Amino acid sequence: MKLHRRIAGAIVAGMLAAAAAGASAQSLKEVKLALSFPNGAAWPYLAVAEEMGYFRDEGLKLTILSLNGASASFKAMATGQADYAFSGPAQVLNGLAAGEATKSFYTAYQGHVYQFATPDDSPYRRIADLKGQKIGISTVAGGQYPYLLATLKNAGLSVGPGKDVEIAEVGRGGPASIALQQKRIAAYSASFVDIMAIELQGIKMRRFTEGPTATFISDSLIATKASLDKDPKTATGLARAIARATVFCFENENACWASITKAVPDNAKNPNFTKPLLRYTLELHKLTPEAQGRWGYQSPKAWEAIDDFLVDSGQLKQKVDVSQAFTNDLIPEINHFDAAKVKTDARNYKVPAE
C-alpha cells in the first residue's frame, strides 16, 4: 500500500512539474525575426541568446526567418510576415520616402557590411575604370543594391543596357566565383560574407574604398512605428537579449563559436571560413567612441550621412527627416543588464574539445 502511495505521489509530482513547464512555455511570447542573411556566424548573438536563456529571460520565444537580402527582410517586417527585421538604413529611408512608417531602434552592425570588389589581378584600380564592363551582384533584393547604384553614380557611371555599366545578378558562392573566373563580370558587389566566400575559393579580391560608405552603419533591428509605440517592452527585451549575447561573444569568442555550431551545425563543416567570418563580424560590431559603451546606439551623424549619400546619388528624390528613421529612446533600458555576470558566464562556458 505504501509503495502504491509512493508511486501515485511520484506520478502526481511529475504531472505537476509537466504542467508547470507547460505553463512556463505558454507564457513566452513568440516573436518572428527576419534576417537579411542566413543564420550563423554573421548573427552570433542569436545562438548564444537562445542557449544561455537570454530570450527566455525576456519572456520571448524567437522564430527566425532567414531571407535573401536586406530588402527582403525589410519587406517581411513591413508586410507583417515578421515582427522585427535586421535590415539596413537605406531600406528604412526609402520606406519612409514611400510612406512606410518604420523605425530602427538598435544598430547591431556599427560598420558597413557591403563591399564592392574586383579580382586582385584585374586592371581596374578605380571604380571609374569599370566603364564598359558588367558588374555582378549577389542579389538585387540585397541591401547592397542601392549603395552600389549610388556608388556607381558618384563615380560618374550610368547604369543599364547601353549605358556605362550593366549589373547582373549572379548569386553567391560558387556561381559568383565562376562568373569572375570566366570574366563574365569585372567586379562584384555583395556583403562581406559573400566576398569572403569567394576568397575562400582561391580568388583574391581587392576592395574599392572610394566614397563615404566605409563609415556607414549597417544592419539594425527595425519594426513598424505602430509596433514600437504599442509594445516597446518586447522590442526592448529582444534587443537586450541580443546585447547580452554580444557581450558574451566579445568576452569569449571560442564559446560564442561553440554555441553557433550547436544551433547551426553547418557552420562547423568549414571552420576555415566560418571562424574568420565570426572574427570579422565581431569587428563590425565594435562600438564607436560616440556610443559611449551603449550597445545598439545609433549615430545621428551616420544616419544623416547615409541620407545625404542616397539623395546625392539619386536613390532618394529628396532628404528624409532622419529623426523619423531611428530612435535611441530604448537604448538605456536595453543596456540595463549585468554585463559583469554575462562576462563571467562567458568565461565559465565549457567549450567542447575539438
Image (cartoon, helix red, strand yellow):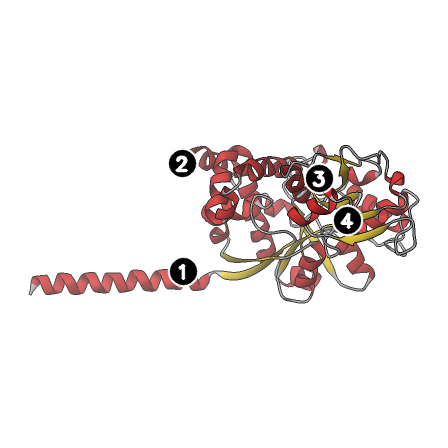
Residue 81 left/right relative to 211: left
Q: Quick one: quadrant of the C terminus? A: top left
Camera-nearest label, 4 or 3: 4
Q: Label 4 amino acid?
A: Gly
The relative height of residue 321 versus residue 346 in the rendered view (above or below) is below
Instruction: Report the residue marked by disc 2.
Output: 350
- State which tag comes first along the sequence, 1 or 3: 1
Residue drawn where x is 85% and y is 48% of the image: 150
Q: Label 2 amino acid?
A: Lys
> Residue extending furthest front?
182
The relative height of residue 106 versus residue 18 in the rendered view (above or below) is above
Q: Which mark is residue 46?
A: none
Residue drawn where x is 76% and y is 46% of the image: 189
Q: Label 3 amino acid?
A: Gly
Instruction: Report the residue marked by disc 4.
Output: 136
- State which tag comes first along the sequence, 2 or 4: 4
From the top left corner, tell me how far across and down residue 68 is, in percent.
66, 56
Q: Label 1 amino acid?
A: Ser
Instruction: Report the residue marked by disc 3.
Output: 111
Instruction: Report the residue marked by disc 1.
Output: 24
Residue 308 left/right relative to 250: right
